[in-house]
Image (spheres, grey):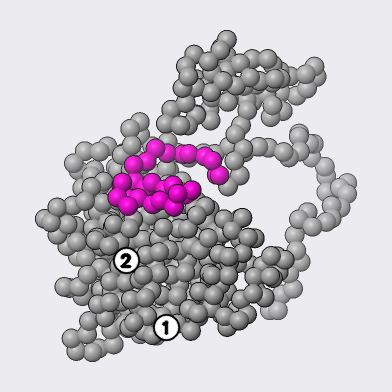
């Protein structure tokens, strides 16, 4: 791999000529990819008197800020073709799953690789819903947060907190091969944690919601669907025979299915990066939750609603778009890191929104959103930049259903637990075992420097060179 050669030995390879040395390297292409480590052999000779610590003598490194074209794992889970607007879970088009499946059946598909039979789905649903109940101490834990704490801060902390209860699930306590052996006992332990995390995700999210409302917590009910149980735990106020509206229950289930996975996005990558140290799955999921909390990821649909509120009425859209072009305003809900045409989920969201609005009435921001959509789709500025609408417009549905704005990322995190666990399980069971993820850097800092006594140092000033001085009020 990456060895000097006279010419390419195969048509399925990449031939690289290093003009610094004149050497030619033959790099195999496998699955339309090359190994970045092949470039380590490509080193420049040291000039007379040049220090060997210079980066050029350590072999070429592949710089990829933001991982725009870096593959870190072989996966069978989710396929995305951003240019064609295609999304498939284990080969099944997202449009078919949204129409015919439900969130827990799709969760089984993502995690285990195939659609379940009726008995298999019954067992899976039963186990997940059974594990929705939390330890009584969880109430005290959630109550320890301030009433105005962001629900994502509560949820992230709660996932990490869960791990403290299950010593049998912690490789630091049970041995680092706990999840990587792949035998029956190992798989059984893995499955139990999957049931617990998916089951308790809705319970913890509902607790975070009710802390904000000053309400007592609700034990997960029996006999309801996954999203039905979630809505029940959030909204139940003691009514006799209360059940959530079935249209809203189904709508939330569809949105959960759409958000269940999206390949190696920022949060899934965070879960795998953390999981590569063989930490327990609760800590890995908590790390993913923290990543999703950011406004460039799970906070995007909240940003869409805040943008629409700032625009106000549809007649204000043209002026807003002109401000976007001048970089005076930020356009949220358009464009995507992966999709260069429309996000395939956005069409399903539109249909789901119509069903929800029949029950709740149309959101007053809907007309503004549609005016923004139509204007942007006719404007060459946005067309040329491939800024099509994406799935973050589902915030209109959440708003219509009565969810507070800062709860939107929670509604993203709860279903995404499924995708995180699918990728985590795949990595634990991959051939060759798990290697800790340890990316490299391109060092551009100072060379060796000798220590200077404090009395002899010159003052360094300027932005980013010295810490800020904070005024303390008490």
Secondary structure at badge 1 equals loop
Q: Nearer the viewer, residue 411 or 277?
A: 411
Q: Which numbered dot is residue 254?
A: 2
Q: 54 left or right of 83?
A: right
- Most extreme residue toward the left is 119
Residue 90 on the magenta segment: yes
Crowding around mark 2 (Cα neighbors within 10 Å: few <14, some 14 to 19, many 20+) is many
Q: 135 left or right of 300?
A: left
Give the residue at x 53% y 69%: 373
Q: Which residue is the site of mark 1? A: 362
Q: Which residues are magenta?
A: 67-93
Q: Position of residue 67 (x, y in %)?
A: 55, 44
Give the residue at x 42% y 39%: 73
Give the residue at x 53% y 15%: 8
Q: Quadrant of residue 350?
A: bottom left
Q: Nearer the viewer, residue 192 or 325?
A: 325
Q: Position of residue 95 (x, y in %)?
A: 33, 58
């Amino acid at each position: 791999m990456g060895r000097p050669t006279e010419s390419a030995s195969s048509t399925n390879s990449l031939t690289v000529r290093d003009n610094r040395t004149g050497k030619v390297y033959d790099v195999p292409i496998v699955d339309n990819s090359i190994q970045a480590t092949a470039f380590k052999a490509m080193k420049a000779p040291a000039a007379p008197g040049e220090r060997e610590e210079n980066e050029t003598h350590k072999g070429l490194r592949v710089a990829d800020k933001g991982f725009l074209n870096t593959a870190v794992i072989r996966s069978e889970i989710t396929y995305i073709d951003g240019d064609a607007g295609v999304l498939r879970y284990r080969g099944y088009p997202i449009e078919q799953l949204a129409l015919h499946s439900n969130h827990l059946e799709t969760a089984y598909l993502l995690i285990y690789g195939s659609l379940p039979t009726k008995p298999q789905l019954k067992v899976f649903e039963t186990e997940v819903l059974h594990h929705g109940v939390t330890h009584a101490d969880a109430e005290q834990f959630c109550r320890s947060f301030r009433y105005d704490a962001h629900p994502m801060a509560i949820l992230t902390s709660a996932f990490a907190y869960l791990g403290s209860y299950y010593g049998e699930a912690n490789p630091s306590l049970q041995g680092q091969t706990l999840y990587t052996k792949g035998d029956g006992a190992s798989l059984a332990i893995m499955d139990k944690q999957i049931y617990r995390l998916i089951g308790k995700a809705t319970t913890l999210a509902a607790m975070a919601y009710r802390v904000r409302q000053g309400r007592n917590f609700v034990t997960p009910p029996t006999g309801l669907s996954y999203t039905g149980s979630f809505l029940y735990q959030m909204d139940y106020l003691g009514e006799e025979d209360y059940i959530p509206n079935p249209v809203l229950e189904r709508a939330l289930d569809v949105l959960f299915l759409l958000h269940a996975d999206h390949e190696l996005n920022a949060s899934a990558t965070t879960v795998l990066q953390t999981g590569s140290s063989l930490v327990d799955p609760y800590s890995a999921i908590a790390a993913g939750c923290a990543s999703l909390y950011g406004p460039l990821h799970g906070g995007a649909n909240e940003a869409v609603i805040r943008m629409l509120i700032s625009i106000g009425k549809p007649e204000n859209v043209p002026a807003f778009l002109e401000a976007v072009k001048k970089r005076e305003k930020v356009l949220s809900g358009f464009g995507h890191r992966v999709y260069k045409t429309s996000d395939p989920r956005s069409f399903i969201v539109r249909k789901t929104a119509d069903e929800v609005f029949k029950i709740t009435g149309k959101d007053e921001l809907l007309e503004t959103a549609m005016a923004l959509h139509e204007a942007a789709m006719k404007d060459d500025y946005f067309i040329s930049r491939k800024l099509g609408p994406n799935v973050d417009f589902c915030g209109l549905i959440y708003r219509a259903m009565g969810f507070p704005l800062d709860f939107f990322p929670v509604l993203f995190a709860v279903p995404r637990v499924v995708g995180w666990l699918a990728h985590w399980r795949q990595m634990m069971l991959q051939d060759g075992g798990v290697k800790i993820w340890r990316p490299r850097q391109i060092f551009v800092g100072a060379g060796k420097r000798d220590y200077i006594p404090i009395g002899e140092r010159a003052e360094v000033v300027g932005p980013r060179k010295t810490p800020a001085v904070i005024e303390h009020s008490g």
